[in-house]
Structures are given as C-alpha cells and as structure tokens.
Image: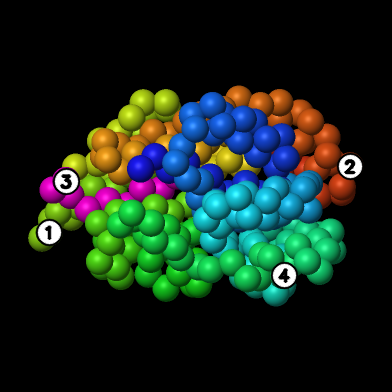
Amino acid sequence: MRIAILSDIHANREAFEAVLQAVRRLAPDTLVLLGDIVGYGPDPGFCVDIARELVTAGAICIRGNHDQAAVRGPAGMTPNAHEAALWTRAQLSAGQSAFLDSLPLTAKLDGVLFVHASARDPDAWHYVRDLRSAEACLAATDAATVVCGHTHLPTIFYARAGREPVAFIPLRDVPAPLSAVHRHVVVVGAVGQPRDGDPTACFALLDTQAREVTMVRVPYDTQDTVRKIRAAGLPDWLGLRLQIGR
C-alpha cells in the first residue's frame, strides 16, 4: 500500500494546495493527515474545510495539539503559538471546531500506527526527536512502524530488540528503506512550517509493500502566506520562519 502522509499543515493554504497537487500526481492508495491542520498560519477555515472534504473522500485524519488548542484553548504553548491559537479559535465556525474536536488521537492502517506526537501518551504531546524518546514511543505499542509528526523535522529511527535505536536523516525525494528486521519511528516533515532548514513543504510517501518511505519536497510561494500572516496581525516570526525553514 502506498500512503501519502501530510503533517503539520498549520493553516498554510499555499503549502497545502501545492502538496495536494503533488499527491494527486503520485496517486497513492490512501491519504493520512497527521494532525495540526491549524495553528500559526492565516487560513485555518480553508484548511479545515479541505481536510473535511478529504476525510469524506476516504482519508484518515487525526488530531494534533494545535487542533486541540484551537478548540479547547491553548495551554503550555510558546507565546507565539498561544497567540496564534487564540486567533485561530476566533476564525473557526462551530462546525469546523466540532470537526477538529472529533478527530481521534491515533489510527492504524496496514500494521502502521499513526499519531501526531508519540505513541507514548498521545494526548501528552511528547516530541520524538532523540533516541530516548523514540525508544519510549516504540515501547508504548506493538506496531512495527510508528509514523508521527509534531517536530517538523524529518527523521527515521531504526530499532532492534535489545539495542539502542539509530537515527537517520532521510535525503529529500530519495526513498529510505524500512528493514524487515527493525522496528521504526518515522517522523515526517511539515507541510506548512518546515524547521529543517529547507523552506519547501514536506510530506511523506510510505510504501508498505516495498518497505520504504520518501520525504517528498514541494516548493511553493511563501511570500503569499507571509503577506497574509502580516495582514492578520499574527506575530512576524511566523512569517519569517516560513522563508528560512526554521
């Protein structure tokens, strides 16, 4: 099965549309939205509406911490994230908020567990960004492969029983193997706010039969999004980081 995985869209319409065009060209078997449809960006209503349409058409969508913050109120966020969450909450209709609030924290497909943050206490929003957190993620599930987002940093952790996991930074647009003798945590990059130094939008294409995953990069015009962020009165840093990929 070929699965396109989009995470951390963050209300970035331009990035979302560019990635969906690339996904259509690849024609995967199914689509997974890995959470954080909203937050930070200037087009939350549009992105939620598209996510709802995709779910109606058969996509899987799970809840991210920014989705939850936009519905239930922010807690424990950075000042910029907190401000953006409050702004986002005011932009959403009752139906859009209800959709986000109804999303599950995890989903399983073809033996793969999908979660926004970590399989370890999914609603605690732990980051998987080092060997210890990857090990804790795998210890919380019997799934051979866990796919998550949340960090905005594409990484693959390979683990064998009794050994410390090994971290690998996948190359852009190059398939990375998923070994039959390993368990894996695949952390996909961000569609709407990359933080790995590459400002192009990122999504993952997972092929469960070929046992490989590709981090696909898609360029888009960040300036349109930056202008909207400024016009909305959101923090300037949220626009700047789109241009530098940090």
Q: Which label number is shown at residue 180?
A: 3
Residue at image point 76% right, 62% down: 96
Furthest toward the left, the residue is 162
The residues bearing labels 4 and 1 have C-alpha atoms spaced at a distance of: 41 Å
In terms of depth relative to the viewer, which is nearer, 16 or 165? Answer: 16
Which residue lies under the disc numbered 4?
98
Of marks 1 and 3, which one's residue comes earlier in the chain?
1
The residues bearing labels 4 and 2 have C-alpha atoms spaced at a distance of: 27 Å
Mark 4: give few (<14), some (14-19) or many (20+) Cα within 10 Å: few
Of marks 4 and 3, which one's residue comes earlier in the chain?
4
Mark 3: give few (<14), some (14-19) or many (20+) Cα within 10 Å: few
Whether 82 is drawn above or below 233: the answer is below
Q: Is residue 210 magenta?
A: no
- Magenta part of the chain: 180-188
Q: Amino acid at mark 2?
A: Ala
Of marks 4 and 2, which one's residue comes earlier in the chain?
4
Name the front one of labels 4 and 2: 4
The residues bearing labels 1 and 3 have C-alpha atoms spaced at a distance of: 13 Å
Which residue lies under the disc numbered 2?
231
Name the front one of labels 1 and 2: 1
Quadrant placement of the N terminus: top left
Q: Amino acid at mark 4?
A: Ala
Residue at image point 50% right, 38% down: 203
The residues bearing labels 4 and 3 have C-alpha atoms spaced at a distance of: 40 Å
Of marks 4 and 1, which one's residue comes earlier in the chain?
4
